[in-house]
Amino acid sequence: MFKNIIALVFAAATASASVYVRDTNNDPSLRVEQAIANVTGTGVTGNFTFVPIPGQTGLRVSINVSGLKQGVQYPFHIHVSPVPANGNCTATGGHLDTYGIKTANAAYNCDKTKPLTTCEIGDLAGIAGNLTANANGQATLTFNDPIITFGNNKTTILGHSIVVHNPDNTRLACGNIFGYALKNPSTSGSHTGSSQTETDSDNTSSDTKTSGASSAAMSAALVIMAAAIAI
C-alpha cells in the first residue's frame, strides 16, 4: 500500500509540471508561448515578460525594473538588433520600425488609439507611457500592445532587444528577447498561465524553464502523503 501512495505522490507532483525550452534560433517549428528579456545596465536590472492576450491580438507586456531614480521618466523600446556579448546597448541599432512609420519628412507622434498607422512597432513607451519609479527606485507596468506578436515576420519581437533609455535618450539598460516554447507539447499538456509568474529568473543562463504549477502540485502531493501515513 505504501508503494501505491508513493506512486500517487509523484504522479501528482509531475502532472502539472510544464517544461519550456528557450527558442535561441527563432525556430519556426516551435510554438512560442511567452518571451522574456532580462535587462541590465549600470546599477539597473529588470525584466520584461510578453504573453498572448486571451481572445485578442497582440501581447500583454509586464515590466519590473529596479535601480531607477524616483520621479524620472524612462522611455523604453524594442530595438532592431540583439545585444552583443559585451553588453553594448548602442549596438542594438534603432527602434523596430518594419513598416517605416517614422520618416524624416514628417513629425513622429505615436497615437495609441491608432497604433498600426502612427506607432513604430518597437515604441512600447508610445503605447504605455514611460517608466516611472517609486521611492525605492522600482518601476512596474503592465499593458496590452495590440501590434507585437511572436510569429508574423513584420511584427515579431523575437530576435530583437529591449532598451531602457534615460530622459536624454541615452541608453541605460538593455537585454535580448528570448521566446520560450513548450517542450514536447503533445505530451506535456496544455499551457497554463502559471508560467507567466516566473519572470525573475535569469533566462540568459538557462535554456529551460519549469512551470510554477509543479511546485504547487508537489505541495499538494506532500499533503496527500502525510494524510495517508497518518491513517
Image: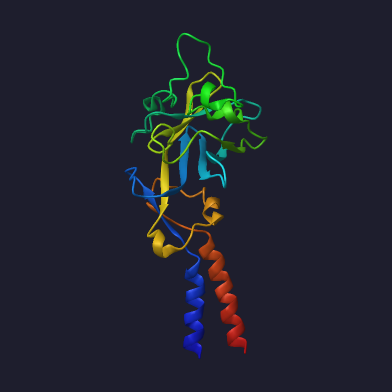
Residue 180: x, y in percent?
42, 49
Q: Is residue 75 visible?
A: no
Nearer-the-camera pick, 16 or 229: 16
Q: Residue at image x 47%, y 69%?
A: 14
Marks counted in the figure total 0
Q: Residue at image x 45%, y 10%?
A: 104
Dividing the picture into quarters, in which one does residue 146 lie? Answer: top right
Residue 96: x, y in percent?
43, 27
Residue 170: x, y in percent?
48, 21
Nearer-the-camera pick, 81 or 104: 104
Q: Residue at image x 49%, y 29%?
A: 77
On screen, residue 82 above or below 118: below
Q: Is residue 191 visible?
A: yes
Dividing the picture into quarters, in which one does residue 103 lie? Answer: top left
On screen, residue 196 above or below 118: below
On screen, residue 69 above or below 107: below
Is 207 placed left or right of 106 in the picture? left
Residue 192: x, y in percent?
53, 57
- Colouring convention used in this rendered image of the protein: rainbow
From this viewpoint, which residue is outermost toward the top? 105
Q: Quadrant of the C terminus?
A: bottom right
On screen, residue 68 above or below 2: above
